[in-house]
Amino acid sequence: MRVAHPARLGVTVSVFAAVIACAALVGVATLVRRFREDEAREREFDDWAADTSSRTGASDR
């Protein structure tokens, strides 16, 4: 059985670690984007609800 040269093994491990780090960054960026989109949607709904209730004279009772 052949054993990889230590330098080649180091490069392989470094590349693997870089790929994992990039995947983690993409995952975090996706979660942040989804959170911001949800917050924006919620603000839009709140604005719509406030506008609708002010036009109809409804109150929050």
Image (spheres, grey):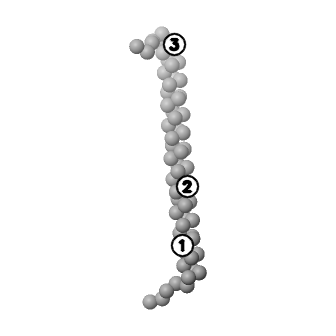
Q: For the residues marked 2 and 1, what is the alpha-carbon distance in whole angstroms?
A: 18 Å
Graded by Cα atoms within 10 Å as few (under 14), some (14 to 19) or many (20 or more), the crowding at tag 1 reads few
Q: For the residues marked 3 and 2, what is the alpha-carbon distance in whole angstroms?
A: 45 Å
Q: Nearer the viewer, residue 5 or 27?
A: 5
Residue at the extreme left of the image, as rendered: 61
Q: Residue 55: x percent and y percent?
A: 51, 13
The amino acid on which the numbered mark 1 sits, given as a three-letter code, is: Val
Residue appearing at x 53%, y 23% in the figure: 47
In the displayed structure, would residue 46 be above or below residue 32?
Answer: above
Which circle, 3 or 1, is nearer the viewer?
A: 1
Graded by Cα atoms within 10 Å as few (under 14), some (14 to 19) or many (20 or more), the crowding at tag 3 reads few
Find numbered disc 1 in the image and state the secondary structure of the residue it sits on: helix
In the displayed structure, would residue 5 be above or below residue 36?
Answer: below
* Tag 3 and tag 2, C-beta contact below 8 Å: no
* Lower sequence index among marks 3 and 1: 1
Q: Nearer the viewer, residue 47 or 9?
A: 9
Which quarter of the image is occupied by the C terminus? top left
The amino acid on which the numbered mark 3 sits, given as a three-letter code, is: Arg
Residue appearing at x 55%, y 85% in the figure: 5
**Which circle marks residue 25 in the picture?**
2
* Lower sequence index among marks 2 and 1: 1
Q: For the residues marked 3 and 1, what is the alpha-carbon distance in whole angstroms?
A: 63 Å
**Which circle marks residue 55 in the picture?**
3
Find numbered disc 3 in the image and state the secondary structure of the residue it sits on: helix
Residue appearing at x 51%, y 23% in the figure: 48
The amino acid on which the numbered mark 2 sits, given as a three-letter code, is: Leu
The residue beneath circle 1 is: 13
Q: Quadrant of residue 7?
A: bottom right
Q: Residue 42: x percent and y percent?
A: 49, 31
In the displayed structure, would residue 39 be above or below residue 9?
Answer: above
Q: Residue 43: x percent and y percent?
A: 53, 29
